[in-house]
Image (spheres, rainbow, N blue to C red):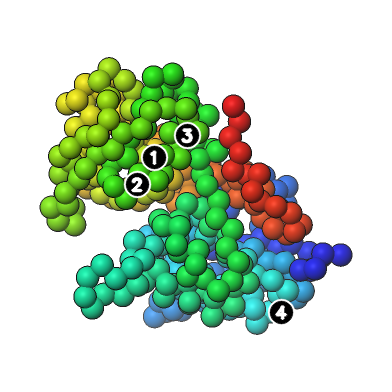
Amino acid sequence: MLAWGKNICVFSGTANPGLSAEIANEMGKPLGDLEVSRFPDGEIFVKYKENIRGADVFIIQPTCSPPSETLMELLILIDAAKRASAARITAVIPFYGFARQDRKDQPRVPITAKLVANLITVSGASRILAVDLHSQQIQGFFDIPVDHLNAAPVLVPYLRERLGKEGVVVAPDSGSVKIAQSYSDMLNAGLAVVAKRRIDALSVESSHLVGDVDGRICLLSDDLCTTAGTLTAAAALLKKEGAKKVYAAVTHCLLGDVGRSRLMASSIDELVVTNSIPVTNNCNGKIKIFSIAGLLAEGIKRIHEGASVSSLFKIEK
């Protein structure tokens, strides 16, 4: 018998049911029976329709659009599981919303990433399983264990084929240099950096390039993409500097109408993403989607069994 209950129960919120179904299929067991509905005034109601007393419960729910709704649903799901006497509750959060606000960079603003961490902890979560947090320090915002998975092992084999031996990984801004360095190491590729200046919330200007991209295949890497301003501006600069092709890879594809329009009109040949959140429009094939269901299913199994998850970061050569 395991320390955290002999039964493993996996439940899905309403944010990304497709990914949850894939995870359950990878694990070879059905999702738990759960009711999620709304009262007439819009309040969220949940009910576990099976016994979870003493069980090791995993709740899959990215806090994606609409973020306030999906976050509140996650909190209620956790609270209901706690009150149903689950032995342990792990919040499986493929995309952690509100993560951009992880520090006070101007007066009188919140640190919302910390606030959300507090809410999840207080609601009754015992553990977090997340994928590619916007910044590494968010792990320290939690007073409970955090298993932080990286989607790179899912994307790298495909990207290696596209870049070949003369590829260059490019950080589209200074904040993504660490991610770019990681991809550069995994792909045995060169590294370049674009300097950008933000004009407003929707627009950026890429002004300088450090590194050689002339005649080479470039990969822009970042953790998420919403308006595509940073990626498309960087791609335009790379093309101007002689790049042969430009690919982009992000874990979380949050593109709205503005972002999709920019992507379609941009110099980016292909945007490679995961299904951490639902992607309903592939922009006429310009977006290539890879599933992280296998990665998360293996992470859930190892957490339940008390095994290490570090080997999930290994890249097949």
Q: Quadrant of the C terminus?
A: top right
* Left or right of 244 on screen, residue 148: right
Rendered residue at 74%/54% (across/down): 307
Mark closer to the chain start, 1 or 3: 1
Image quadrant for the N terminus? bottom right
Mark 1 and mark 3: Cα distance apart in space: 9 Å
Query: At 47% across and 27% down in the image, what residue appears?
Result: 188
Residue 174 x %, y %: 29, 47
Q: Which residue is mark 2?
A: 176
Left or right: 148 with respect to 172? right
Q: Residue placed at 38% from the left, 24% from the top?
A: 167
* Residue 47 visible in the displayed image: no
Going from N to C along the chain, the mark reached first, 4 or 3, is 4
Give the Cα separation between the discs numbered 1 and 2. Answer: 6 Å
Front-most of residues 243 and 256: 243
State the separation of the CA atoms marked 2 and 4. Answer: 42 Å
- 89 or 32: nearer the viewer: 89
User: What residue would you read off at disc 3?
Assistant: 185
Q: Nearer the viewer, mark 3 or mark 2?
A: 3
Element carrying mark 1: helix
Within-10-Å neighbours for mark 3: few <14, some 14–19, many 20+: few
Instruction: State which tag comes first along the sequence, 2 or 4.
Output: 4
The residue tagged 1 is 180
Residue 311 sits above or below residue 92 on the image: above
- Residues at marks 3 and 2, CA–CA distance in whole angstroms: 14 Å
Which numbered disc, 2 or 4, marks the residue closer to the eye? 2
Q: Amino acid at mark 2?
A: Ser
